[in-house]
Amino acid sequence: MRHIFISLLLAIPAAASAQSGRINIDIPPSLAAKAAESVDVNLDGAMLRLAAKFLSDDESEEHNVREMVRKLDGIYVRSYEFDEEGAYDRSFLANIRAQLGSDWKRIVTVQSRRSDNVEIYAQPRGETIAGLVILSAEPRELTIVNIVGPIDLDKLASLEGQFGIPRMTRRSKHE
Amino acid sequence: MNIESELSHLLRRTEPPPGFAERVLTRIDVERRRPRRRGPARALAAAALIAIALGGWGLHVTLRARDEVMTAMRIASQKVAHAQREVRGVSR
């Protein structure tokens, strides 16, 4: 009985966070240590709103990003690039999927031999999306994105390749 | 008058005017009691330095957050656009 109670107590925060669109995307430190380059982004709603004030408000791509992030409650990204193929265990992604409750829907699965495998999960709320999780697994790269808050997928996709979005500022261990 | 007598004349011991010591002590006492005016200025300078330092740090954090927003949106948009292309490619 006591074990059940403790398990319930531990499950409540995880369920509550998954309910709000936020999931735990932290990867084990041992895996992160293997990465040659990494990107870690942790921005809650307050930081997003603050950062949005420093994005250009003219008709540029920054304006589009600004309009998009103003409504969000958080953006969390983990992206790791490895020197060798198979440096990470793909079963780790199962831990991420396990956090997604029944209110999350898998909307896209891309399995490709040529490029990366991508899974996109959305948390629908009415006619909008309240949360988004992107899992991207390549032989030498692992990327997990969690966007909390209303997001338009078409607008998000349209940002790709637009001038003004900087190249990824990866932290390289070789630097 | 030779130089020695001139020096001895100049360096001769003279008594201070009456009440000189009391006036000096009174002046010292007054100066000690007078409130220091440098305190507020120093406090203002310190506050200004702290404000500048905090403002600089806050700006640094905000600009870093701005770059992180752009990086995060770039990664997310790449992945979603890739998935969209693959889906459209299959459906054609």
Image: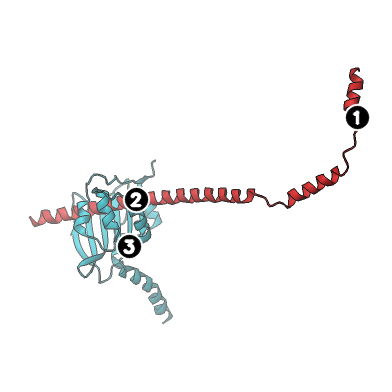
- Where in the figure is residue A90, as x and y percent of width and height? 29, 58
Q: Amino acid at mark 2?
A: Phe
Q: Nearer the viewer, residue A167 or A102?
A: A167
Q: Amino acid at mark 3?
A: Asp
Q: Indicate whether A173 appears above or below A144.
A: above
Q: Of label 3 and label 2, which has the lower sequence position?
A: 2
Report whether mark 2 lies on the same chain as mark 1. no
For marks 2 and 1, give the CA distance. 78 Å
The residue that disc 1 covers is B12
> Residue at the location (56% across, 50% down)?
B44
- Rendered red, the chain in question is B
Instruction: Please tell me the colour of chain A.
Output: cyan
Q: Nearer the viewer, residue B57 or B35?
A: B35
SS class, disc 2: loop
- Residue A86 in view, yes or no: no
Q: Specify the subunit that label 2 lies on.
A: A
- Foreground mark, 3 or 2? 2
In the rendering, which numbered label is found on residue B85?
A: none
Q: Residue furthest top?
A: B2
For marks 3 and 2, give the CA distance. 17 Å
Q: Residue furthest bottom?
A: A1
Q: Amino acid at mark 1?
A: Arg
In the rendering, which numbered label is found on residue A73?
A: 3
Q: Residue A18 lies in what quarter of the image?
A: bottom left
